[in-house]
Image: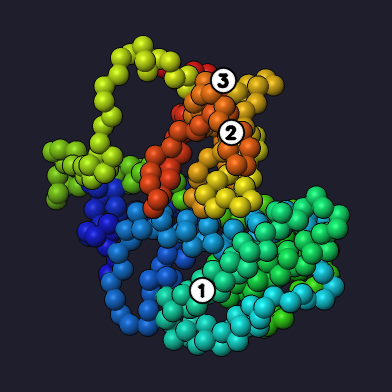
Amino acid sequence: FLTVNGEKMSKSKGTFILASTYLQYLDPAYLRYYYAAKLSSGVEDIDLNFEEFANKVNADMVGNVVNLASRTARFVQGRQLSASYPDDGGLLARAAAEGQQIAEAYEQCDFARAMRIILAASDRANQFIEQAAPWNLRGDPASAEKLRDVCTIGLNLFRQIAVYLAPVLPGLAEQTGQLLGVPVRHWDESQRPLLGVTVGEFKHMMRRVERAKIDAMLAASAEPDEEEGPPDTLPMDSDEPLRAEPLAPQISFDEFARVDLRVARVLGAEEVPGAKKLLKLTLGLGGENRRTVFAGIRGFYEPQELIGRLVICAANLAPRKMKFGVSEGMIVAVGDDSGVYLLYPDDGAKPGQRVH
């Protein structure tokens, strides 16, 4: 049986979701991975918990697997991978040896076990890239070959993972083939590296699951249920966030008005070498007005998925000198160490407009 958020599906609560409605709001790859990560060879009920759904897809797929490609492909775009496979400390060989275990897990319908083995390989690959830090090698002619070797390793480890995920995420395998110019067709391609091919332009492979889209899907699915009747009251929200971070002392309206909140467009976004939590954002406030802001959202948002989006920026903060540069403002977000969520203006807002 399938339950949603721990309860049976309900039309009045919007949890009786048609496939056609889901597809209007969310990528089917999200659901394919989420179900695969929960399905074992036994007969068990599955609960589609949307908070867990968003966190798992964002952490495992966007922040882990796809992140491996986005962190390396852009440094060798339009260039060929190394002609011979560099020393990766045995990472490719280790994951290749695990291919038999993954295949057996698939054959036994133990998809959850297959996903665990694959994600562990992706974790190791990301650790390698973090230590190799290709972003520190770019721009240095003397390090050009080392940069290519690091990216050759990273992209081959990513391709190997994409091959293993192909039974669950065929779209990701197809995108991988487009990026590297060689289609993913056979399981055996996980056993050997791809060398000398020209790397194409990296395009978004999977965007973060946004809670707003989940809420919109649930709202679109909701309709009065004759048996249950319309809800008499709105759901009671937990007070846990308020207890975790109590209200600040009162301030006057004039004090609040001193903070100049503006709509800004993200013109550029990149990881900050040596900073595990920071992204460096270039914000446009309209015309030629630009701001550089360091935001603690790395790991929760991919740099490429932010470009072009509108955010809310505290625009009149005094510049703050940091280890990695000068931050000229802040962007507005909510959350904690388990999840960070940017606040976006509604349709029609324009860069430079003030938040009143």
Q: Nearer the viewer, mark 1 or mark 2?
A: 2
Do labels 1 and 2 touch, CB within 8 Å? no
**Image side of residue 259 versus residue 77, left or right:** left
Q: Specify the amino acid type for callout 1.
A: Ala
Say above or below: 31 vs 257.
below
Q: Residue at x 77, y 67 (%)?
A: 149
Q: Badge 3 is on which residue?
A: 352
Q: Badge 2 is on which residue?
A: 321
Q: Label 3's element?
A: loop
**Image side of residue 39 versus residue 157, left or right:** left
Instruction: Measure the C-alpha gap from mark 2 to mark 3.
Output: 24 Å
Q: Nearer the viewer, mark 2 or mark 3?
A: 2
Any part of residue 119 in sight = yes
Whole-percent x, y for residue 340 in the image: 43, 45
Give the residue at the far top of this rendering. Answer: 254
Q: Residue at x 47, y 66 (%)?
A: 33
